[in-house]
Image (tube, coloured by chain):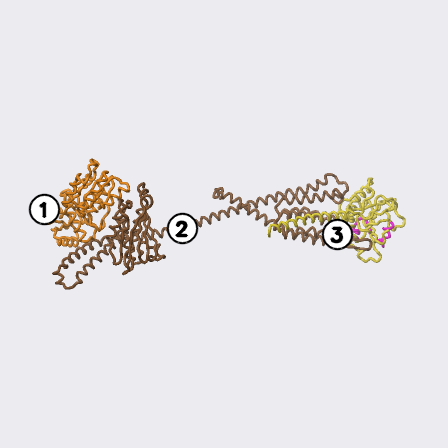
Chain colours: A yellow, B brown, C orange
Amino acid sequence: MSATSRLRQRLVLGVLTVLWTGAIVGGLAALNRYKSTPGEIGTLPSQWPQSTSVERDEKVPTLVVFAHPLCPCTRASMTELGKLLDRHSTEVRTVIVAMKPSEGGDEWSRSALTETADRLPNATLMQDLDGKEAERFGAKTSGTAALYDPAGRLLFHGGLTIARGHEGDSPGVKQIRALLKNQDSTTRNTPVFGCSLLTPELAR
Amino acid sequence: MNSTFNSPTIQEWLSGRSEELLSEHKASVFRRADKMFAWLMGAQWLFGIILAVVVAPYAWEGRIRSLHTHVWVAVLLGGALSALPIALTILRPGTALTRHVIAASQMLWSALLIHLSGGRIETHFHVFGSLAFLSFYRDFRLLITATVVVASDHLARGVLWPESVYGITNPEWWRFLEHAGWVIFENVVLTAACVQGVNEMKQVSKARAESEALAMVDREKTVELDAALEALKNQQEKLVRTEKLAAVGQLAASVGHELRNPLSAIRNAATFIAKRTGTEKAQEAIGDARVPQFFTVIDRELTACSRIISDLLDFARERPLSLSSCPLYSLVEDAISVVPPREGVTIRNEVSEESPVPQLDRDQFRQILINLVQNGSESIPAGARGEVVVQCEGGDESPWRITVTDSGSGIPKEIVSQIFQPLFTTKTKGTGLGLAIVASMVQRHRASIDVTSQPGNTQFTITLPANAAAVAA
Amino acid sequence: MDQIRILVVDDEAGLRTTLAANLELENFAVVEAANGVEALDCLSSESFSMIISDMRMPEMNGLDLLREVKQRTPEVPIVLMTGFELEEMIDQAVNEGVFTILTKPFRIEDILEVVRRATRSSVLVVTEKECGSRATAKATLDGAGVPTQMVVNRDEALELIGTGGTDVCLVELCGDSAAREMIGRIRERDATVSVIAVSPPLDSEAMNQMVATRPFALIEKPIEARLLLQTIVRARGPRSNA
């Protein structure tokens, strides 16, 4: 191969490498952003809604978690929830509200998520047909968690994960822990990372 | 073994060669590792896609599902991440660019896989596993690249999205160090392994170079030994030949010597009887003219015997030189007078009477001239006319050149180089020693002789060192 | 003229008798002796003009015989016949005054030539007044037992040559270039005389002039005794050997 064509090849490779680096960096940046983009947090009522069929505990706080059974990101939320309940199951009553569309099939009621949820200690799995309960609570994103005290006062609402589908210590879980220990903390809300619970045409 | 390689040139060669071997070895290690990583990149891409599809195939908005971003990311970003490394291993295997790109890419794959697996703790092990794989290159600089990539990724995310790295929004300052510490720990161990690996390669290269040098030296020695053996064999053969010749010579000489007395007596007796039967009265009584004729025959043949014996004895005996001033003209005249005349052959002495006088052994040089002139005379075909001419030039400042030229039929090219060998003759009669005697006598005078020959002109030239030099010697 | 008497000594009968017979054909008186002792016996009772002896004989070889003869009758020339002798023996014979050496087999003409020379054998040494005490040729020859006569006067030399009693003439030169023509004149006088010129080293022109006078041999001073004696022996041998 002649010297000039070799030089040309080198140049081409050099340029390609630089472009590639840019593409990768861009791609990773985009991925990170996507992962860090929370879903709509929604506004939850500060007082337990009357209309809900979710049962509230009288003695201990109740933690309501809204989940889309097929959302993969919410699996991380479940994992975090599991970690939380491993330590504090007796101090809190958990209800997992799993959405199911009326025309949805079996995969909605028997997904990996629901099975995980079932195994959580001191937790109940509740089917939420067409997301009516979620609507009542104003939850828009899968993985939204709301902690109400026995009196029905909203203590915390937000996400249990730090990023989309990302396990790891999250400020949300930390705060719930603190609240359960009756230690006050400054943060009230954390971002929720998860799929939208609402179908686009149902979005407000 | 090192004592064999004392000379600086060998040392230089050794260090050069072991560098060469080391580079070759390193290059093959790089290429091997490149190939391994190419496969790994491909496998990771496949794995990433499978992971995405298994873990998070769809994203949901209520009832509507769409292909999860993870799948896109796995296919596109994963594909891109693997594409350049694989391309480089095909186009530029073994180069530094290739392996550094691979190092960067591999660490970014860790990041990607962690994302695709949803931050699973176990996936973080990929980072440390990747660092270990990179040490297959035995190039510790790759660990630097990898660490820089990981650190940059950490830093960037730590600055922009701290929660994704440490799990909390405001990590403690030492969290970074905790991560860094683990990475540094592994890097230190792997760097040591790489460096040691390279050192071992250096040792191996050095040892290989030395063994190559040894083989070379060995080969050279073998070649030299073979050559020496060959030379020795030739010398031995020559010696055996010479000894044989000498033994034969001695035998011939002693036989010749013994023959001298009987031949003398025969000659004397024949002369007497020839004279007695040569008177007129006796011839009348005998009545046969062949009687006196045959006495001539006897005389002639006895002369021939005498000559043969002289040849043998001259050849066998090495007479030391007794030098005296020998005017060439009279010496040549002398020699010519002894050579039997032949019909049609004229022998001319064209040596100038004024030519310088050399120091020669008179007897031996006379013999040389006799042999050469007789040779020349006999080379003229029977019945033809021809001449033999003796000339001379030089002597005072330049060497003497004494030439004997004949107009005979010439010496064929193939045998010209052999004519001075003993026992070599083209004549049907004769000992074949004449020219060999000439050659050895010439040599003893520290002169040289050579011959040029074409049909019709053959010239023998004796070259004697010049007077000036001879006197000084 | 008195018949020339020759003593032939050889232990091999074939050689001895045939040689004697050939000499007798030439009218020489020949006496045969089969060995050295017999030869000395003959010598003590009779006188001879010359002796021809073989070199290799049992009990007393030719060299020993030579020595004995030189002691008893030094003026009698001895010719030795040789087949193939050691160089040293021949050298010694030359140094001790042998007349000449004949190589076997020789032709009868050769021996006759030698006999003719031997009958008038004496070496005439001609020197120049200039040489004076530097004349060394005679001393060398005397030491070897070679009968010599020395003259200084050129004319005297020519006369002596004219009488025919000389076979070899040594002309010893010490520098005078005119003396070179002496050689030419000697040869004119008697061409059968072998002239040996003895002179100091010459330059090439002088050398050429010398050579032009056709001496038998040219010897440079300082005289190497061996060379001188060899040259004389050779001059006295048959021309085909010279």
Q: Is residue B49 left or right of residue B292?
A: right
Residue bearing mark 1: C45
Classify the position of the C terminus of chain B by image quarter.
Answer: top left
Q: Nearer the viewer, mark 1 or mark 2?
A: 1
**Is label 1 on the same chain as label 2?**
no
Q: Tell me how far mark 3 sits from mark 2, CA to CA.
A: 81 Å
Please tell me which of labels 3 and 2 falls first in the chain. Answer: 3
Whether residue B248 is visible to the viewer of this picture, yes or no, is no
Depth check: give the residue in front, B106 or C195. C195
In this view, the residue farthest toward the top is C133
Counting from the top left corner in percent of width and height, residue A187 is at 82, 41
Q: On the image, which quarter does residue A168 sit in? A: top right
Q: Residue at x 13, y 43 (%)?
A: C73
Task: Tell me which amino acid carries mark 3.
Answer: His
Depth check: give the residue in front, B356 or C43. B356
Q: Categorize mark 3 by other alpha carbons within 10 Å: few (<14), some (14-19), many (20+).
A: many
Q: Residue at x 30, y 46 (%)?
A: B445
Residue bearing mark 2: B229
Mark 1 residue element:
helix
Q: Is residue B73 left or right of residue B9?
A: right
Q: Is residue B400 left or right of residue B176?
A: left
Question: Chain ID for label 2?
Answer: B
Residue bearing mark 3: B70
Is A134 in the magenta? yes
Residue span colored magenta: A112-136
Question: Chain ID for label 1?
Answer: C
Q: Tell me how far mark 1 sits from mark 2, CA to CA.
A: 73 Å
